[in-house]
Image (cartoon, helix red, strand yellow):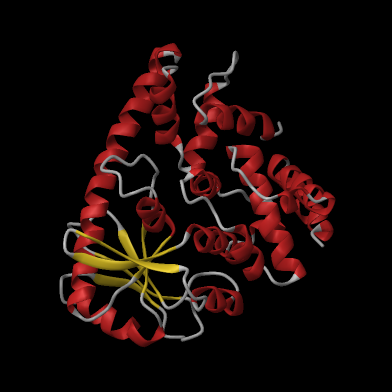
Amino acid sequence: MSRLKPLKTLSALLAGDLPVKVDWMSVLALANEALVTPQIYSAALQTGTVSQFPSEVRIFLHEVWLRNRERNRRLFEQLREAIATLNAAGIEPVLLKGAAHWVALGRPAEHDRMLTDIDLLVGDEHAAAALSALEATGYVAHKLWKDPGKYVAADLGRPDCVGVIDLHRRPPGREAEARAAMALDGELATVSWDGVRAKAPSPALQVFLLVLHDQFEDGGYWRGKFVLRHLMDIADLTRQPRGVDWDVVAGLANTRLVRNTTDAQLLAAASICGAVVPRTAQRPWVRMQYARLQAQFAWPHLKPLLVQFSG
């Protein structure tokens, strides 16, 4: 069975709508796989549709929503403490992915997006010092990458913490584009709260870094893979008062391949999550690539055949 119908239903639920007929088993399976289950409940609360859910679905979603809120509360406490440790060592990390998104939304006390870990970029020059500083507070490196060409330096955990810290040398994805993006003037802003200081990427830079992660590091452009949480992040960023400076995104996507992958991700964010994206994402070639990605998502066994049309 095609997975496009559950995806369409899930898209509606994440917007706070309730379709007439919902195959809850397939939709919740997809939501759990995509790590967006709490956001179904959050959206339904905002629109008032939650009372119309079947009771067993409502109970399940409420429990996941509550547990995720508590985990996020503890996760952001862990983030603040980790940044304080790095600040004491003279390091001001750059927030990536979920942590950057949280800051872009104004650091809400109650946050319903699921985070798998904490991503902190400290750069090549601070990786060793950051690792030592965090280990001195009880963190243990589960994995270490000594190769300077690897984007991540270490994965660290601590028994009393709910999440793993991914310590980055650079953002994931193609190295040349990642390093060029981080070197762009004016796209990193210092943010401070509760006595700690970090840097946060601009909305445009966040969008581009998500493209590098999803489309290149994870191979989504070739594998027909949608990271639904990141598509929702892009949609959220486009709705913020500042919006997204699409000229910055276009300047970073400076090759045909990177431009195509960027526009394909933007079209997916618009089609699935209602993001407001530039007209370049509607080019015929991009629409064709998005159709290919949908087919690969819907029928995974066709991925090897369809990848030859990635262009």
Position of 173 relative to 133 (above/below): above
Which quarter shows the N terminus?
top right
Residue 207 in which image quadrant: bottom right
Residue 300 left/right relative to 171: right
- Can residue 307 be seen here? The reply is yes
Residue shown at 40% from the left, 43% from the top? 113
Q: Nearer the viewer, residue 116 or 50?
A: 50
| Numbered label tally | 0
Q: Position of residue 75 (x, y in %)?
A: 26, 52
Position of 256 relative to 204 (above/below): below
Residue shown at 42% from the left, 69% from the top? 188
Which quarter shows the C terminus?
bottom right
Q: Position of residue 161 (x, y in %)?
A: 21, 57
Residue 135 left/right relative to 181: left
Position of 220 relative to 89 (above/below): above
Residue shown at 19% from the left, 72% from the top? 85
Residue shown at 63% from the left, 62% from the top? 247
Residue 26 in which image quadrant: top right
Q: Position of residue 242 (x, y in %)?
A: 48, 51
Position of 209 relative to 240 (above/below): below
- Can residue 134 be seen here? The reply is no
Q: Position of residue 171 (x, y in %)?
A: 48, 71
